[in-house]
Image (spheres, grey):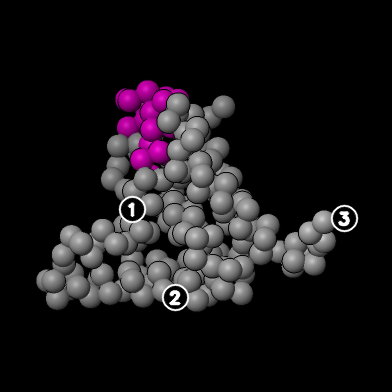
Amino acid sequence: MSCFMCSDDHLRVVAIASLLPERACGVHDLARVLRELEGAAREHEDAIARQREIPLFASRRADLRVLAELHAMNAASVIARYGEHDGAEMGAGEPAPSLTSSDYARLRAILTRPIALAKLAASYEYQSCETPKWEGSDAERRVSAIARFAIVCQPEYKAAPWTI
């Protein structure tokens, strides 16, 4: 099995998508939740621009926390697979990417496609499961939640019987 560091946008999409099952009630609710998350990012950026950055505000940014956690798990997997030296050369030593309101706008097209989210989550899982830390981790739970959410968002799921 091989693995690599996911791109910054790949990590951003998985981080944002992992918050959707907690907040959205299906695909019709995606736009509202994405607007809320983007709005929180914009408020944070405005606070920084006005030099009113306060650590408490930043700590409420679940998207940033999740992004850092997912990046760390991906890096741990690359290092577990290839070792410290080669892992560092592959980008495992780089800091977690940032997440701005413009990232939400730029990634909106993919963030509103549940099947694409599920596939990106599966790819992230494949790249990040090489470490013993994976099983039972928040990252593993988040990836599973994205897959379930993608299924629930499908019209065929809503039309299917609950029991027979």
Residue for badge 1 = 65
SS class, disc 2:
helix
The structure residue drawn at horizontal position 63% and vertical position 53%, both measured from the top left corner, is 148
The number of discs equals 3
In the depicted view, which residue is nearer to us: 96 or 34? 34
28 in relation to 97, above or below: below
Q: Earlier in the sequence, mark 1 or mark 2?
A: 2
The structure residue drawn at horizontal position 23% and vertical position 75%, both measured from the top left corner, is 46
Gap between marks 1 and 2 measured at Cα: 18 Å
Q: Earlier in the sequence, mark 1 or mark 3?
A: 1
Q: Residues within 10 Å of mark 3 (few under 14, many from 20)?
A: few
Q: Given the image, on which type of amino acid does mark 1 rest?
A: Arg
Residue 2, image x and y in percent? 53, 29
Residue 94, image x and y in percent? 30, 42
Residue 12, image x and y in percent? 43, 56
Q: Given the image, on which type of amino acid does mark 2 rest?
A: Arg
Q: Earlier in the sequence, mark 3 or mark 2?
A: 2
Q: Nearer the viewer, mark 3 or mark 2?
A: 3
